[in-house]
Amino acid sequence: MEIASQPRPIEAQRFASDKIQQMLAHWNRTRLSPGYPVADWADHFEHEARMRYLEAQFLEDLRAEVQGWAASAPTHVDGFVQWFEDLKDVGPGQGDPLFPWLAGDANREQLCWFFEQEAAGEAGFDDLVAFTQIKLPESAKLELARNYWDEMGRGNPRGMHGPMLAALADTLCVRPTIEGTVWESLALANAMTAMATNRAFAWHSVGALGVIELTAPGRSAMVAQGLRRIGLSDRERRYFDLHAVLDVKHSEDWNREAFRPLVAEDPRRATAMAEGALMRLVCGERCFARYRKHLWATVSHAPGA
């Protein structure tokens, strides 16, 4: 399968914008935070309608980029799972040179900038899984529940993944902000949030979350290697060390307990999940390219210099 070689636009120009992605990011932060009744519901829902339409346009632009690729995904169980697993090797952004460089060459300042971008664009895997699992068929719902329980440290606050990430930010003395984050990273988080919270894209979200589990372990291991190289302890880099190992099992379980029964029950879901996976990978690919552009801006930062 040669997904990576198929032609596609370099970027979705309408949404390649700091302003638009920051607007969506602030809206997502506000609407997903616990709150109270508002004073003017008419104004609230007018703004909500505008933002929901903007979000849908953003998703449809991403979807239009990958529909041709996703159409090549088989709609029978074994073929789809094999197609999906192949994304680890040939999907957009896989094997990006950024990560070996982070592992072996980046200094502390550069690793901090990378982490700041990643942390600010982090949509919260636990919350994405929780939104996505609503009304899913039993087998997939149970698999997402097990995944959520792992994200929550299986009930142990010290094992919760979100606080681990926050603790690493404190260790590195970074304070991620929406305004200080490149639009590509915000777009990735906004796309993941949009798919998880919009039930018309529920199957897309299953595919997008599954491809994170599939592709993240190798990158996490290299980031952990870089953090070890600059002196972080086992405890301080635990978030990346954990995901380098745990997500391998998560991906195997996701294939068996989510993808297989979902496609067996309704083959149309294969195409939607393929689209969601590719949408996530394209967003990640853009992030990696933008990170390299920033981090390798001078000759002294470039690999081999």
Image (spheres, rainbow, N blue to C red):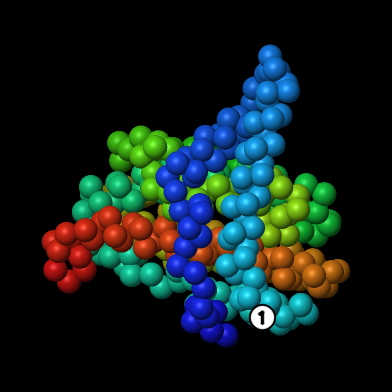
* Rendered view: 157 above or below 7: above
Residue drawn 58% across the image and 37% down it: 28
Q: Quadrant of the C terminus?
A: bottom left
Residue at 71% over, 29% down:
45
Q: Quadrant of residue 70?
A: bottom right
Residue 76: tell me if it is visible.
yes
Label 1: few (<14), some or many (≥20) within 10 Å?
some
- Give the image location of residue 266, x and y in percent: 84, 69
Q: Quadrant of the N terminus?
A: bottom right
Query: How far from the left and from the top, in percent, is residue 226?
Result: 29, 58
Amino acid of disc 1:
Ser
Q: Nearer the viewer, residue 302 or 82?
A: 302
Give the quarter of the image for residue 67: bottom right
Residue nearest the observer in this picture, 189 or 210:
189
Asked whether, in this view, residue 233 is left or right of residue 178, the answer is left
Residue 222 to residue 197: above or below: below
Q: What residue is rendered at 63% in x and 39% in y?
A: 51
- Left or right, residue 131 beside residue 162: right
Q: Residue furthest right?
A: 265
Q: State the SS at label 1.
A: loop
The residue singled out by tag 1 in the image is 72
- Image position of 299 (left or right of 122): left
In depth, the one of 228 and 276 nearer the eye is 276
Find the residue positioned furthest to the top. 39
Residue 211 appears at what percent x and percent y?
Answer: 58, 64
